[in-house]
Amino acid sequence: MMLYNKKRYLKAATLLLAFSIPISSFLNARILVVCLVLALLNLNISRLKLSLFSDILVYLIVLICGVFYSAEWQTGLRVLETNFSFVAIPLIIVGFNSTTDNGLNELIYSFVAGLFVACVIVLVHATVNYFLLGGVSNFFFYQLTDVLNSHPTYLAYYLIFAITYGLCILYYNLTTFKHGIIISLIFFFFIVLMLTGGRTAFISASFVFAFFILKFLVDYKNSFAKRTFVVVILMLLCLFIVNGIEQEGRNVILDDSWERYVLWESALQAVPDIVFGVGTGDYRETMNAYYITHNLTFFAKESYNSHNQFIQILLTNGIFGLVAVLILICRPIFLAVKHHHVLGVLVFFPFLLYGMTEVFLGRYQGVVFFALLHQVFVSYYLSLKSEISALKDP
């Protein structure tokens, strides 16, 4: 009975962990520690297989080794602290046992519920500020997510995942919820996604929409597929309209695309050792030194990183780090393709796009989100073996 209660507590805490990710990183980090303690108390060593987190282990070893040849080792330790989720979440997921469709869906439902609450919070906060202070800018970009102390890019990541999941269960009719509720949630999340204004998010959303359009064109067209197709077309049209309006009204101040190119070039030029990099903790000093010597004082003042996950890891940890990150992202994609799991491909492929314009593993919000998705899906795939996935494409 005691063991049963521990499992129930761990399950409840893990669901709360997923729920709190979009709402508060401060709260989520503390729930993560509680979950880890419960997982350790409930740990079944026989289920702790290296294959579950071998790619995560490689990535962490590269980061740890990078601390040893970093001059700024304190910064390196803070980077390791940011990546603590990669240590805790594999142990938590082993204890939670998400290797069934129900376990997978329960975690996703909890995350989506938390995302809905987060969206309501930002919209209410923006509305209140609009009436008190005036200005529609309260509904966009940083001002939109300021109440959550979060970057709009990460909210966009969360929203694209939720929209993708909603379209999958709608297309394959994999839910007992009424389709009207699912469609309403998809459109609600899509509206908030438009407010975040991230160009990379728009490209990622377009990739997801393109998949369902092509799928509809070549598949048997049942009522569920037709319904999903209409939803996707409407969102895609809105996407192009919003993007067109944005392009027409865009000015030099708002357009930061040139900054990305300068940051990418600066980071690549600043790499002193392409094999090992500068070390896990020395990226800021290395980049700032380059900015100052090349008259990019504003970038140095703001201590900008490269805004590219792959260039950033090449700068800090060299080729070894770049290979480790690519394995980390591509392994769940490979397993998803192997098991013909549509959702897995659609969930993880956008991270390759995110990595082109943001260091999504540079903040806690990005690390905990990716770590949770990675371990939930990898655990699920490794448990399937010869079984058929619920979302397996016929």
Image (cartoon, rainbow, N blue to C red):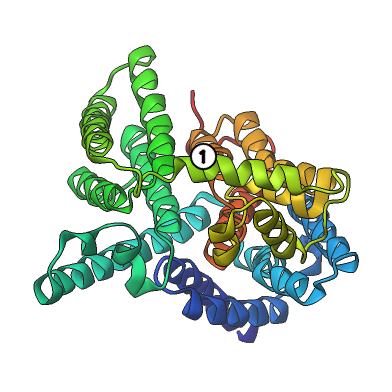
Q: Which residue is mark 1?
A: 350
Along the line of sight, which residue is nearer the eye, 63 or 248? 248
Q: Quadrant of residue 368?
A: bottom right
Residue 33 visible in the displayed image: yes
Q: Is residue 162 left or right of residue 64?
A: left
Q: Position of residue 351 (x, y in %)?
A: 55, 43
**Residue 167 spot, x, y in % from top left:** 34, 38
Whole-percent x, y for residue 76 in the image: 77, 70
Left or right, residue 67 beside residue 266? right
User: Observer-nearest residue: 130 or 294?
Assistant: 294
How many marks overall? 1
Q: What residue is at 31 percent from the left and 49 percent from the top?
A: 193
Disc 1 is placed on an element classified as helix
Q: Is residue 230 left or right of residue 354?
A: left
Which residue is farthest bottom?
2
Which residue is drawn at the image coordinates 14% and 69% (left, top)? Answer: 130
